[in-house]
Amino acid sequence: MKRGDYTDIGGTGASFLTTQWSFMEKVGSSQDIDNKALVGLLLERYWKPVYCYLRRQGYDNEDAKDLTQGFFHEIVLGHHLFETADKSKGRFRSYLLVSLDRYLIKVRQKQQARKRIPQEKLVPLNVINDTDIPSVVSELNPAESFNYTWVSTLLEEVLEQIENQCHRDGLSTYWYLFRDRILEPILTTQSPPSLDELCRKYQVENAAKASNMVITVKRRFGAALQKHLRDLVTSDEQVREELEEIKKFFPSIAQDGQ
């Protein structure tokens, strides 16, 4: 997994989607021009996991793109999936995946996958190539690839938020230490540099101070991640379940800041 894998095949890139269920409630109640923007943000969050799920189901690049477009056009928007999702049932992505499986059954029965594509594409899949898929996805089953892609997109958004906050708050060196000591070793599967090495690189007084700086960013990250997860589900138990899902793929980054 490389840093670029987060955005090479899509994702929000520049925006942090702070709440999922509240956005869906706005989509269901609003008819103004902002409604399209809200739907767009939700599409950006979920199209990449759907696409990777389809690839792991055995569809080639073009068929997976067509089916992704068709699913979002006919089911997600056509059946108002965002508005009709039941918040009390917990994770929206589980509901989305069940709907996707039902859609695939319907498509196979009618053998009309390519006829379902709207002229105006919903999501930018025209740039997708086989080489754009993170290599780890090819080792996962379809459901795992869906969850892995969703988790990686979520983590990218949270990390981007924390990075921006650190720069805003005058804590750029804190971020660089966290990035070099924690983030990059996870993404590159390499050993982390020593604190002494990082102290020399960033002119930090000593290793103890550098360690505290890293912990500060880890705590910010942990708090932001948990806040985001609470917006996605309906109970603390489901937050814990989501954290376990993240630890399954990214065990180190999901640890708390202790």
Image (cartoon, rainbow, N blue to C red):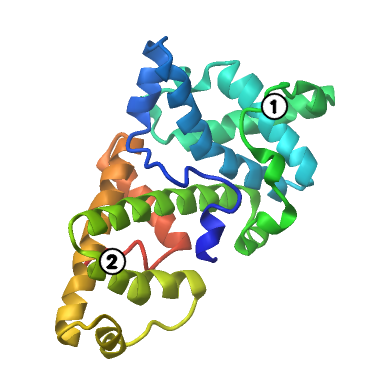
Helix, strand or loop at mark 1? helix
Whether residue 188 can be seen here: yes
Q: Amino acid at mark 2?
A: Trp
Give the mark nearer the N terminus: 1 vs 2.
1
Residue sitting at x 77%, y 26%: 107
Closer to the camera in the image, 115 or 31 = 31
Q: Amino acid at mark 1?
A: Gly
Image coords of residue 238 (percent x, y): 33, 43
Residue holding disc 2: 175
Residue sitting at x 19%, y 72%: 213
Q: Is residue 161 left or right of residue 122?
A: left
Find the residue positioned furthest to the top.
31
Q: Residues within 10 Å of mark 2 (few under 14, many from 20)?
A: many
Q: Quadrant of the N terminus?
A: bottom right
Whether residue 258 can be seen here: no
Image coords of residue 20 (percent x, y): 38, 33
Residue holding disc 1: 70
Q: Is residue 110 left or right of residue 106?
A: right
Helix, strand or loop at mark 2? helix
Numbered tag placed on residue 180 in the rendering: none
Q: Is residue 87 above or below residue 257?
A: above
